[in-house]
Image (spheres, helix red, strand yellow):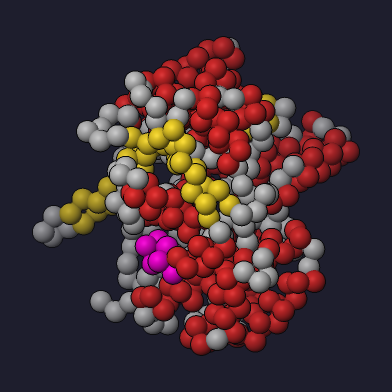
Amino acid sequence: MPARWDRESFYQFNNFLTYQQDRTQFEGVFQVPPGHYLWATRNHMQIVPYWDFDYPAADAIAASPRDHVEGFRAVLDEAVRLRLHADVPVGCYLSGGLDSCAALGLAAKHSTRPIKAFTLSFDHSDYDELPIAREMAARAGADIQPISIRHEDLADHYADAVWHSETLFFNPHGIAKFLLSRAVNRAGYKVVLTGEGSDEILAGYPHFRRDLVLSGARAHGAGDVDKLLARLQDGNKISSGLLLPHGQTQKLDRLRHALGFVPSWMEAFSSLGAKFAPLFSDGFAREFAGRDAFANMLDTLDVRRQLRGRDVVNQSMYTWSKTLLPNYILNVLGDRMEMAHSVEGRVPFLDHRVVEVARSLPMSQKIHDMIEKHVLREAVRPVITDTVYRRQKHPFLAPPATLNPKGRLNQLLQDTVRGSRLAAVPFYDQKRVIALLDKVPAMDPVAQSAFDNVFSGILSACLLQERFGLGAGS
């Protein structure tokens, strides 16, 4: 079949950085949704659900804090132990974050020899976690192997990473994971433990904390809410414009009516979608005028059985886990980047038994005093460093192209936007994109970071179209 853009999926990505759970970026090509299997006979095909989160009602959770911590520790420890079983050595991805450090710390307990830990190191201090990872590796008795990533490396391998992912990027972090798995392969390893999934089941992202603050606004004075939101924003500056809203958003009235609130991650991505919208070609803008991508996405979920009556944060986690988790995180930051180099990534936090324990935890065990993943911190405190225990969540992001105006990654962006690659993509107005790119040097750092997500999406669209020879779609 001919390779063509799926225009609906492309529009959805440019509105909320993902797409419906059964779609792809290719016209006529669909995927089996999360928690479903495909039953096919000679005369019949059916998509059948076999698992879902089934969060309990908001008022149906009770147990002592000690029971929660000990129960979660036991089930996570067993998930890690099971994933160490292999007929080849098993390594670990290691960042400065709680999730990968927890996996390494627990794995070290079950290993009779030092575990190989693979760590990315960026050439920008705001994004480099190597010093924290080294401290954790020493704590676990692991053999750490740093992989240095420069802007030049990201530029040189951007197209290959996009080709393997078959989707669009909103940050070069996917290329970094592509290079990380290459280093694992070259070191002779075929299996690694990874920390993906922890943020999804334990409310790790800052937008989940924002949901908690806003949902409790009635119990706090307006001043207290403003202070908490300001504290959240100040502690997560590199998340602004991606995981936290920045600037104008699109209309989300249908979403608010359906759920009774707007999940902060959708508001954040809507603010990014509002930055994409002025860049569309006139024809593409007319084609989707009045389309509410968020409401359409919600129509594909079982709102009545899976969202009604649940805690606001659990609702937000559910919608994220049905879209961003499978379509982006487990793709661009997971399996496709690993399998590009024949590496198997094993994900203990997404063991269904771990998820089923996590879903029944009270929200105070997920977010405690505005600190995320409380139960995990307490459960693995004996096997992680104090630095990691006290550190707030930092999303895994690579340094944006525009941070280094003279670097090769920014040159790739400039050449692509101003040349024939962007001109061939049927969805953007090239003159408008160039005009916006010319404004970037005068922007403040937060705005530069937010708009860099837009340019990453546009750059990856150009490279995806070129690699697959994509037609415009119908």
Query: Is residue 164 found left or right of 255 in the rendered image?
Result: left
Residue pictured at 62% horizontal, 66% vertical = 401
Q: Residue furthest right?
A: 223
Q: Quadrant of the N terminus?
A: bottom left
State the image quarter where residue 351 is shown: top left
Relative to 147, is 141 above or below?
above
Query: Is residue 397 found left or right of 176 in the rendered image?
Result: right
Query: Is residue 135 found left or right of 25 in the rendered image?
Result: right
Q: Quadrant of the C terminus?
A: bottom left
Residue pictured at 42% horizontal, 82% vertical = 472
Q: Main secondary structure of the magenta part?
A: helix
Query: Is residue 287 found left or right of 184 in the rendered image?
Result: right
- Residue 463 on image: x %, y %: 46, 74
| The magenta segment | 159-166
- Residue 164 on image: x %, y %: 37, 62
Relative to 23, is 206 above or below?
above
Relative to 149, is 291 above or below?
below
- Residue 186 on image: x %, y %: 34, 50
Number of numbered markers? 0
Residue pictured at 38% horizontal, 53% vertical = 182
Q: Is residue 399 visible?
A: yes
Q: Nearer the viewer, residue 32 or 4?
A: 4
164 is within the stretch colored magenta: yes
Residue pictured at 65% horizontal, 87% vertical = 431
362 is within the stretch colored magenta: no
- Residue 246 on image: x %, y %: 73, 58
Q: Nearer the viewer, residue 112 or 240?
A: 112
Q: Is residue 61 visible?
A: no
